[in-house]
C-alpha cells in the first residue's frame, strides 16, 4: 500500500523520509512533497526544479562567492 504523502503532516513526512532513506524513488517523492510546502519567500531553486545540472553548479559558485 502506497501512502498518501500530501495528506501527511510534516512530522509524518520526515519520519517517512527517515524510514525510506535508502529507497531513492520513495525518498524523492516524499522530499518533493515536503519541499513543496516551503514558504514562497524562502524558496530557492533545488535540483528537482532544475533541468540543467550546470544551473546547480552556478548556484553553488554564487553562494561560495557571497560567503567570501
Image: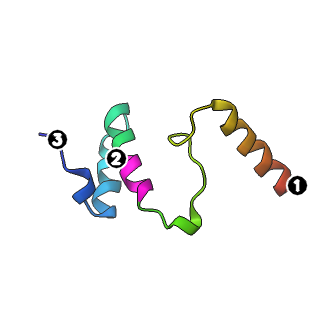
Q: Quadrant of the C terminus?
A: bottom right
Confirm whether the magenta stretch covers residue 46: no
Reply above or below: 62 against 40. above
In the picture of the structure, the residue carrying the numbered disc 1 is 68
Q: Residue at x 60, y 55 (%)?
A: 44
Q: Which residues are magenta?
A: 30-36
Q: Position of residue 9 (x, y in %)?
A: 28, 64
Disc number at residue 6?
A: none
Reply above or below: 15 against 60. below
Mark 3 Cα shell of 10 Å, populated few (<14), some (14-19), many (≥20): few
In the picture of the structure, the residue carrying the numbered disc 2 is 30
Q: Name the quadrant containing residue 21.
A: top left
- Going from N to C along the chain, the mark reached first, 3 or 1, is 3
Q: Residue at x 57, y 68 (%)?
A: 41
- Provide the major secondary structure of the magenta segment: helix
Q: Residue at x 27, y 59 (%)?
A: 12
In the picture of the structure, the residue carrying the numbered disc 3 is 2
Q: Name the quadrant containing residue 10.
A: bottom left
Question: Do tag 2 and tag 3 residues touch (Cβ < 8 Å)?
Answer: no
- Going from N to C along the chain, the mark reached first, 2 or 3, is 3
Secondary structure, mark 2, is helix
Give the foreground label among 3 and 1. 3
Amino acid at each position: 500500500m502506497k501512502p498518501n504523502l500530501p495528506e501527511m503532516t510534516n512530522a509524518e513526512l520526515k519520519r517517512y523520509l527517515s524510514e525510506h532513506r535508502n529507497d531513492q524513488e520513495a525518498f524523492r517523492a516524499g522530499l518533493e512533497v515536503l519541499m513543496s510546502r516551503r514558504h514562497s519567500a524562502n524558496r530557492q531553486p533545488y535540483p528537482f526544479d532544475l533541468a540543467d545540472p550546470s544551473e546547480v553548479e552556478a548556484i553553488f559558485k554564487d553562494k561560495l562567492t557571497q560567503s567570501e
